[in-house]
Amino acid sequence: MLLNRIIPCLDVRDGRVVKGVRFEGLRDVGDPATLAAGYAADGADEIVMLDVSATIESRSTMLETVAAVRAATDVPLTVGGGIRDVSDAAAALQAGADRVSVNSAAVQRPSLVDELADRFGSQCVVVAIDARRRETGRWETLIAAGRRTTGIDAVAWAIDATARGAGEILLTSHDRDGTGEGYDLDLVRAVAGSVRTPVIASGGARVAADLESAFHAGASAALLAGVLHDQITTIRDLRRALAALGRELRPC
Amino acid sequence: MTGSRSDIAIVDTGLSNLASVEAAFRRSGIETRRTIDPQVVRAADGVVLPGVGHFAEGMRRLRAADLVGAIRARIDADRPTLAICLGMQLLAEESDEAPGVAGIGVIPGRVRRLPPARIRPHLGWNLVRASSGSPEPRMLVEDGAAAFANGFALDAAPAGWATAWSDDHGPFVAAVERGRVLACQFHPEISGRWGGALLGAWIVMVRTEVPTCC
């Protein structure tokens, strides 16, 4: 059986890890390679690194950061943010990513997912979906770091993306991101119940019970950022607490 | 050849997470080199055959670089060789992923599609259980957990190879070893301290090899 995963997320801008609430008010929280190495040593199962830079010039900086994080960590590394075509993905993989994550570009041009899966294999392609709850009880897909609505149903997009070859869905609740209110479990259930690929729950985690609830709702992995960067909790403590709840994690 | 200057070459057909493999060796103090030269693949102290992607594309690229014979020759001669993920599958005779496409054929058996499960591909960490001695030989691979990213795997122990197992809705082969050849379905280069220790053990084997040629 696949083991559930705990994944720290590094939002990186201009070579530094930053963190905001609901995607805004970014502040500096540290050096990417130093943080990633610490998390991996603490028992992180994987690292996700997302480029939240706004400018084209920052692309080369990002690739240097990918190489630095790769050198410092011995667990799988997923890199996303600004990947718009096969050559962007190839550059990230050559710099040391094991998987690439696409978001806005895939919403705007879904065939990007097919192209990446054909070229690199499904296991290499993560589709990140930023979702916001609507009054209808459904969720809408957001793009451009949560700033633009699309009218596209998030569950329908997840189904389409996996049919096109996505090997994993990174599912972020825009409503919960940075709030510490726990994952949007209804969203996790809706997506994990609709696709066969692993789903990474993201947005709102604070304590081990949040992760356990996400796993119970069908998430394969749980992503955290702010509570780790701010040292409100640690991977080690989360692992210990999850073990006490009976959740089997990788021995390390 | 002994010492820190062991020559370890990574087969670079443009179809793998090469940077992750290189970074893992670098953490063990080893600078590797990339190659698609059959002579280097025959002669290097150690050769790594990595690979992600499709079985047919992997074989196409090995054939295009004239590497199939070189890889087969070094494995037949028991030269230190490490195959990873698709690299391991390419050593088998054939695969469900590409019916009719011949593999390198040094590991007997056919690579099978993993049994159906709620979650596919088989992506993430899974437990590995190694054979730990008599009657089978002791393995470099020890019990632990490894990072996987596969939809296919051998489902039977190949004759003549020590076998480590994983399970996801049915057992499948996590790794095989014969002499100085190690083939892993998982990715040791990103399997944490456990994977780093396995690479370290393989590197020790490369360094202590007594030349068998000439």
Image: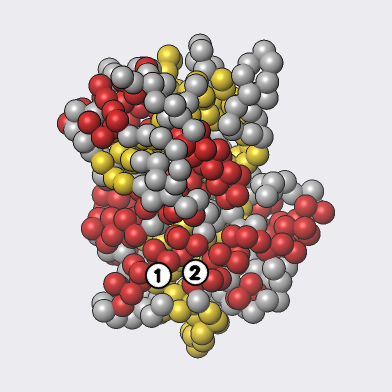
Q: CA distance from mark 1 to mark 2?
A: 7 Å
Residue at position x 25%, y 21% in the image: B69
Q: Would residue A181 be found to the left or right of residue A171 on screen?
A: right
Q: Would residue B47 be found to the left or right of residue A246 on screen?
A: left
Could you tell me residue A92's position as x and y percent?
Answer: 33, 60
Residue at position x 67%, y 13% in the image: B135
Give whichever of discs 1 and 2 has the lower sequence position: 2
Residue at position x 78%, y 52% in the image: A243
Screen quadrant of the N terminus of chain B: top left
Amino acid residing under circle 1: Thr
Q: Is residue A181 visible?
A: no
Amino acid residing under circle 2: Ala
Q: Residues within 10 Å of mark 1 (few under 14, many from 20)?
A: many
Q: Nearer the viewer, residue A16 or B208?
A: B208
Which secondary structure, mark 1?
Answer: helix
Pointer 1 and pointer 2: residues touching (CB < 8 Å)?
A: yes
Residue of label 1:
A65
Residue of label 2:
A33
Could you tell me residue B67's position as x and y percent?
Answer: 24, 28
Q: Chain of mark 1?
A: A
Q: Would residue A137 be found to the left or right of residue A213 on screen?
A: left
Residue at position x 78%, y 59% in the image: A241
Q: Is residue A177 above or below residue A195?
A: below
Could you tell me residue A190's position as x and y percent?
Answer: 56, 54
Q: Is residue A155 above or below residue A172?
A: above
Q: Would residue A165 be found to the left or right of residue A111 on screen?
A: right
| Quadrant of res B55 | top left
Which secondary structure, mark 2?
Answer: helix
Q: Is residue A12 above or below residue A40?
A: below
Q: Chain of mark 2?
A: A
Could you tell me residue B148's position as x and y percent?
Answer: 51, 41
Q: Nearer the viewer, residue A232 or B192?
A: B192
